[in-house]
Amino acid sequence: MYEGNIVNLQMEKIIAADEIFDDKTHHCQVFKYEIEDDDIYLQLKEEDLKAISLNAKYRCYILSKTETLLCMGVVKERYQCEHGNMLKFHIQNGFYSTPEINESINRK
């Protein structure tokens, strides 16, 4: 459904007390979307998997040609495979269309 779309992942808040807040935008691409589980598999376009926290909530902006979709959630898994650095992102509370911020989000 969203496979191939560009994703910008931004930390919203930390869950663990010993975690450090990361204000960096992480660039990904949708690899696979599992509707029944509300999971998106993201291919991280960066080298360092450890830059993505398993103890934080993230904003996930999915950039299509016509709109920007926003969903909130957590990274459940991060791993390397033959497809590169992968993240299993679990969506909480569905998607929101945000066309008004389409211009302000970096499309790398």
Image (cartoon, rainbow, N blue to C red):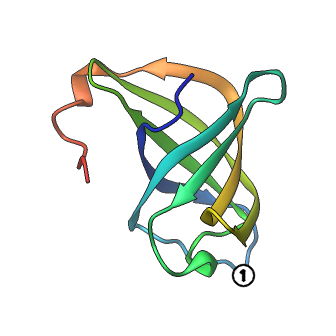
- Say left or right for 101 vs 5: left
Q: Position of residue 64 (x, y in %)?
A: 34, 27
Q: Residue drawn 47% across and 31% down? A: 70
**Residue 95 falls in which quadrant of the image?**
top right
Q: Residue furthest front?
A: 82
Q: Is 47 on the left-hand or right-hand side of 25?
A: right
Instruction: Quadrant for the N terminus, please.
Output: top right
Quadrant of the frame with the C terminus:
bottom left
Q: Which of the two residues, 79 or 93, is positioned nearer the viewer here?
A: 79
Question: Which residue is at the far left?
Answer: 103
81 relative to 42, above or below: below
Instruction: Give left or right: position of 101 versus 45.
Output: left
Other-residue count near label 1 (Cα within 10 Å), few / some / many at <14 / 14–19 / ≥20: few
Count the marks. Answer: 1
Identify residue for label 1: 18
Residue at position x 23%, y 49% from top?
106
Q: Give coordinates of residue 18: x percent, y percent.
A: 72, 81
Q: Which residue occupies the foreground of this view, 14 or 59?
A: 59
Amino acid bearing label 1: Asp
Above or below — where is 26 with respect to 6?
below
Residue 6 lies, in percent from the top left, at: 39, 43
